[in-house]
């Protein structure tokens, strides 16, 4: 049974849509936080946040159990290992609002702090929600290992990219601004068969989640399907990252 705190009435009541992927009242918390992103409001609504956190852990636990069934490398993880703190790091940011207004869930063999490919769910009604994963902007040594794996085993990557499940769900790797070099990286010939992938600095694939899926009981099934289609890419990347330099 889930409860949340209402600031207006100072009482607790049952969460709605308890069978949804994420509860409607959890989304409502973040809507309110966007327009009241300051410590005073958060402190007044801390009980509501605690209910939101429980709902997020519940979703993470259900998702993690489903993914562990086809990816045993995550078998040691607990839900608490996979969610991020709501507090923002504002030390070097022009935006001084103290709290994140989205949910981020990252499931990776190394936990949140290590440089491995993993599965990511982003829930944000304002900017858009998505699911997928991979290895986002790896550090220099990790990037070197991934490029070496692509160079030596590009047929494996090509097979993953061309497989129908991956192609249908993702199309290709994400091509955000700044993640693909204009010229070949140092040490690789321009005529290498996999040069277009060797130019990448980040290796992620994501699929947008329609807003209606967030509170749909079938939303979890949709996310798990996305993660299954992502797994071959994660396996390839983690094979590279586990290889000795």
Image (cartoon, rainbow, N blue to C red):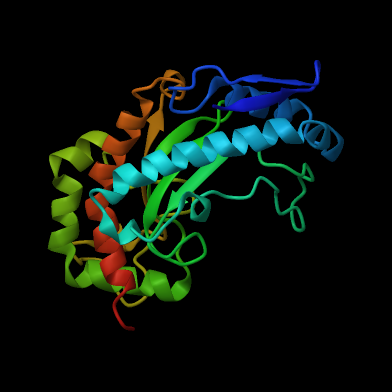
Q: Is residue 170 above or below residue 243?
A: above
Quadrant of res 242: bottom left
Residue nearest the viewer, comparing 55 with 234: 55
Q: Residue at x 51, y 30 (%)?
A: 128
Residue nearest the viewer, comparing 144 with 181: 144
* Residue 189 in view, yes or no: no
**Apparent side of residue 145 relative to residue 31 in the rendered image (left or right):** left
The percent coordinates of residue 22 (x first, y second) are: 49, 28
Of all residues, the one furthest to the front in this rendering is 1
Of all residues, the one furthest to the bottom in this rendering is 245
The percent coordinates of residue 62 (x first, y second) are: 39, 39
Of all residues, the one furthest to the right in this rendering is 40
Q: Is residue 42 above or below residue 73?
A: above
**Apparent side of residue 227 relative to residue 168 in the rendered image (left or right):** right
Q: Please count the marks in the image.
A: 0
Q: Residue at x 50, y 59 (%)?
A: 112
Q: Residue at x 38, y 22 (%)?
A: 217
**Apparent side of residue 106 relative to residue 237 in the rendered image (left or right):** right
Quadrant of res 131: top left
**Which quadrant of the rendered structure holds the C terminus?**
bottom left
The percent coordinates of residue 114 (x first, y second) are: 47, 67
Q: Is residue 226 above or below residue 111?
A: above
* Residue 76 in view, yes or no: yes
Q: Is residue 27 above or below residue 81?
A: above
**Which quadrant of the rendered structure holds the N terminus?**
top right
Q: Residue at x 53, y 38 (%)?
A: 56
Quadrant of res 47: top right
**Apparent side of residue 241 relative to residue 114 in the rendered image (left or right):** left
The percent coordinates of residue 95 (x first, y second) are: 76, 44
């Amino acid at each position: 049974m889930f409860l949340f705190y209402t600031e207006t009435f100072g009482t607790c009541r049952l969460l709605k849509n308890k069978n949804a992927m994420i509860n409607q009242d959890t989304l409502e918390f973040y809507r309110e936080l966007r327009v009241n992103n300051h410590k005073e409001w958060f402190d007044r609504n801390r009980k509501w946040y605690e209910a939101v956190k429980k709902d997020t852990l519940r979703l993470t636990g259900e998702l993690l159990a489903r993914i562990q069934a086809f990816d045993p490398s995550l078998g040691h993880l607990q839900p608490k290992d996979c969610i991020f703190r709501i507090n923002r790091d504002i030390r070097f940011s022009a935006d001084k609002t103290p709290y994140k207004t989205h949910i981020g869930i990252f499931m990776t063999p190394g936990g949140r702090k290590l440089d491995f490919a993993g599965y990511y769910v982003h829930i944000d009604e304002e900017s858009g929600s998505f699911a997928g994963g991979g290895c986002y902007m790896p550090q220099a040594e990790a990037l070197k290992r991934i490029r070496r794996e692509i160079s030596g085993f590009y047929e494996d990557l090509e097979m993953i990219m061309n497989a129908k499940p991956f192609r249908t769900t993702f199309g290709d790797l994400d091509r955000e601004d700044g993640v693909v070099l204009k010229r070949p990286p140092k040490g690789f010939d321009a005529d290498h068969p996999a040069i277009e992938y060797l130019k990448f600095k980040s290796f992620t694939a994501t699929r947008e989640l329609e807003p209606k899926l967030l509170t749909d009981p079938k939303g979890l099934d949709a996310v798990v399907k996305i993660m299954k289609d992502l797994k071959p890419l994660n396996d390839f990347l983690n094979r590279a990252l586990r290889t000795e330099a």
